[in-house]
Image (cartoon, helix red, strand yellow):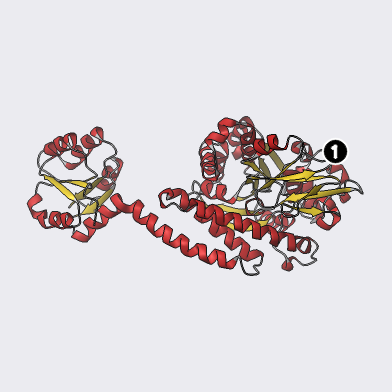
Amino acid sequence: MMNKQNRLLWVDDEIELLRSHIIFLAEKGYVVDTVTNGEDAISSVKENEYDLIFLDEMMAGMGGLETLGQIKEINPNIPVVMVTKNEEESLMNEAIGFKISDYLTKPVNPSQILLVCKKILEGKKIKGEYAAKDYLQDFNQISHAMLQNMDSDEWIEIYLKLVNWDLELDIHPEIGLRQTFIDQKREANKEFSKFVENNYRDWINSSSFENRPTLTVDILNKYLVDEVKNCDNVFFFVLDCLRLDQWLVMEKHLTDLFKIDKSYYYSILPTATPYARNSLFGGLFPSEIEKYYPQLWQGSDDDENSMNKFEKELLQLFFDRKKIKLKNDLKYIKIIDPEVGRNFEQNILSYQNTHLTAVVVNFLDMIAHGRSDSEILKEIAPDESAYRSLTNSWFMHSSLLSTLKSISTLKKSKIIITTDHGSIRSLRGAKVLGDREASANLRFKYGRNLKVDDKHAVYIKNASDYKLPKRGVTINYIIAKEDYYFVYPTDYHKYLTYYKDTFQHGGISLDEMLLPIIVMEPK
């Protein structure tokens, strides 16, 4: 039975012919007021609060569209359903321009009317009830799957389900399942960390690509090479620190412009810019870059920019090794501030004859780092849902979206978009011991005599086992699992509080390691 407070107004100059419909709605629990002309409708709207109005388009005196306009001036938020005998498209367009909620063509039947009422007045509640039912069903399936011995593809499927439910629960906060979801995702990260710890060394040391998931070092071979061979205008965008959930909210703005094909891959460890992005552009593991191109592997992990000065050179060396000659010079742009982004956007058409343009966009990484140090950003984006919203707001008004829109007009172009790593909201501190020279990162460290509880991190005694730079005989690495972040004993509680609830990267988690790669073609 409907809530008795749902009050409707039906405006029609032949209202008596609709009496059976009105009785039907009353039986369903709606209170229905009726008037026969636009003037009376305006008066009723001024005097009463209505949840929904049915409005006849063709009436003597004040017509339906004129009445609609005045109703919207009085209260622009009242849902109005236009009812008419006129099926002309121009009328439909005009009515939609007035922001009607729905459009029905006479003769209408009771089920049509009831469906419209439910959709407008109860739609969110009904969808929420079904979402709750579906999630609880998926919850059991996901929980059961995590008890099994899953492979890398099955973990991607689990992650996709979790991300999609994360977005769905944003729409239906009223169903009260957010904490249930948070608990399940934490459990998923726990099991995923075990899975990676048990399999990662086999993956990176496997001589066969078929025995491992697609990794960072495989992206150029698997996705870029064929596009470069088959297309004369390729754009390769790397959005630093992009999570899958962030991409999905961005993708909604692109579906009308592009045919979009998504795949997924596993980031190498550590999931940090100096390692993952160099490996992405070089098609090599960090230890291989250090070995073959030592002049391109230098700098400090504490200053990420110093470690990523040679991405263009690494990409060019990759094509040289593959004996693939580009038709003209490789173009490389790093967008680190809005001005650079706007300049690229304004000159994008000049790149339409460039064989390959590689673009690094650093804004999302800056949001993650900036939020750690800004109370205002923490307040604006207190959790993952708000973080997605912040990403969406940035993207809608960004030069990146404008640039992609411009590229969509270049019908022979191809766009590949990916990221080097994601990020995780770090909520639990892990006490770590080490010397003063240890790196300062919160989700991974290297140094001498590092010690941490193995429940919280993977300990790497021999860097070569993980194809990482050796940095010295006595150097070892630790990589955080799940949502832990490293804190030294000195001023432990101060830094535990300071870094809690910040978005970090470098460790092992679903959001940091399972990453999208998108191939887009203008429609």
The residue closer to the viewer here, 7 or 219, is 7
Instruction: Characterize the local packing of mark 1: few (<14), some (14-19) or many (20 or more) Cα atoms within 10 angstroms.
Output: few
Q: Is residue 493 left or right of residue 146?
A: right
Q: Is residue 177 left or right of residue 193?
A: left
When the figure is inspected, residue 154 is found, relative to residue 311, above or below; the finding is: below
The residue closer to the viewer here, 453 or 415, is 453
Report x, y in % for residue 11. 15, 45
Report if residue 466 is visible in the image: yes
Residue found at the very far right of the displayed protein: 473
- Residue at 71%, 42% (x, y): give it: 331
Residue at image mark 1: 437
When the figure is inspected, residue 130 is found, relative to residue 91, above or below; the finding is: below
The residue closer to the viewer here, 186 or 230, is 186
Image quarter of residue 96:
top left
- Residue at 36%, 51% (x, y): give it: 124
- Residue at 54%, 57% (x, y): give it: 162
Q: Is residue 416 left or right of residue 78?
A: right
When the figure is inspected, residue 136 is found, relative to residue 286, above or below; the finding is: below
Report x, y in % for residue 183. 56, 54
Q: Is residue 206 left or right of residue 11?
A: right
Image quarter of residue 214:
bottom right
The residue closer to the viewer here, 155 or 483, is 483
- Residue at 75%, 50% (x, y): give it: 479
Report if residue 412 is visible in the image: no
Amino acid found under the numbered disc labelled 1: Glu
Disc 1, SS: loop
Report x, y in % for residue 221. 72, 58
Residue found at the very far left of the displayed protein: 16
Quarter in which the N terminus is drawn:
bottom left
